[in-house]
Amino acid sequence: IIDRWYKKGIQEIESSEGWRIINKIDNLQLSYTVFRRNYEELNKLLSKYESDQDLALQLMVRDNRESFNAFLGEITRLLHNFLVSVKSLVDHTRIFYQEEYEGTEFENDYNEKIEEHFSNVPVSKFVQELRNYTLHKALPLTGATINIDKEKGMSQSITLNIDSLRDWKKWSKLSREYMDSNDKNLVLRKTVNDYAQKVEEFYKWFGNCLQEIHKEALEELEELQNKQRERYEEAGFKL
């Protein structure tokens, strides 16, 4: 008898609309988490260089070339991982949207937000196309700079060499505008942070929308799960 009601409760949960959509949302959330972790790892190392003058000076010593190259190599590795997760999140989100909301009332709101945060934003186009450059042409050239100002003191940053990127013919107009708006060497941390902020803003909005769109289905799922929990307790099981 216990086995019968247990299976019936599980079947009710797993056949519900709430169960279907929450699993798809969780899968998309995993893609966002992968992106976020890659961003945080890259940003941490970039921040370390910008905030640690001793490290910057040590790496710039002429006879410390091996450590300097190893440091930039690690930056490039983390940048590669970050860019791959950028594209994965873009693709997974687009597929999720197409399967669930294309042709619905939500379509216009979604497309407006995509344009606002990504399609019409130079930094977003540049980062997404830098992923294509990195995977299909070459790893971007990174460098390290130190600037000394009489009033502001010493500052340092990790950069991308823009001149080495320009020859690629697949940059969009917005990406070229973004490169033109920067100096010869683009400060990588600012670019990465600006893009990550756009992503965070969009997915905060998107997550709130999903909760509202699927409110009834998620509430029904919660009720089914509560009923199953009550059945466990009535049978003497502790949760």
Image (spheres, grey):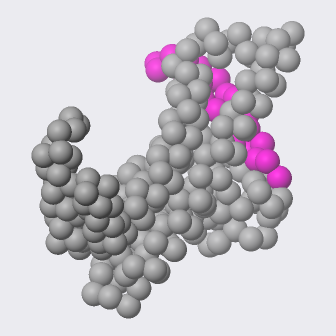
User: Is residue 237 inside the magenta stretch?
Assistant: no
| Residue 42 in picture, x, y percent from top left | 58, 35
The image shows residue 21, relative to residue 166, as above or below, that is below
- Name the residue at 70% across, 68% down: 171
Q: Nearer the viewer, residue 19 or 204?
A: 19
Q: Nearer the viewer, residue 22 or 89?
A: 22
- Name the residue at 56% across, 33% down: 41
Horizontal side of residue 6 vs 192, given as left or right: left
Residue furthest to the bottom:
103
- Name the residue at 72% across, 37% down: 77
Number of numbered discs overlaid on the protein picture: 0
Residue furthest to the front:
1
The image shows residue 4, relative to residue 183, as above or below, that is below
Name the quarter where the N terminus is drawn: bottom left
Q: Is residue 128 visible?
A: yes
Q: Is residue 116 visible?
A: no
| Residue 47 in picture, x, y percent from top left | 52, 27
The image shows residue 188, relative to residue 102, as above or below, that is above
Name the quarter where the C terminus is drawn: top left
Main secondary structure along the magenta-highlighted residues? strand
User: Is residue 160 inside the magenta stretch?
Assistant: yes
Q: Nearer the viewer, residue 39 or 91?
A: 91
Q: Nearer the viewer, residue 92 or 10?
A: 10
Magenta highlight range: 138-161
| Residue 163 in picture, x, y percent from top left | 77, 52
- Name the residue at 64% across, 12% down: 55
| Residue 36 in picture, x, y percent from top left | 48, 44
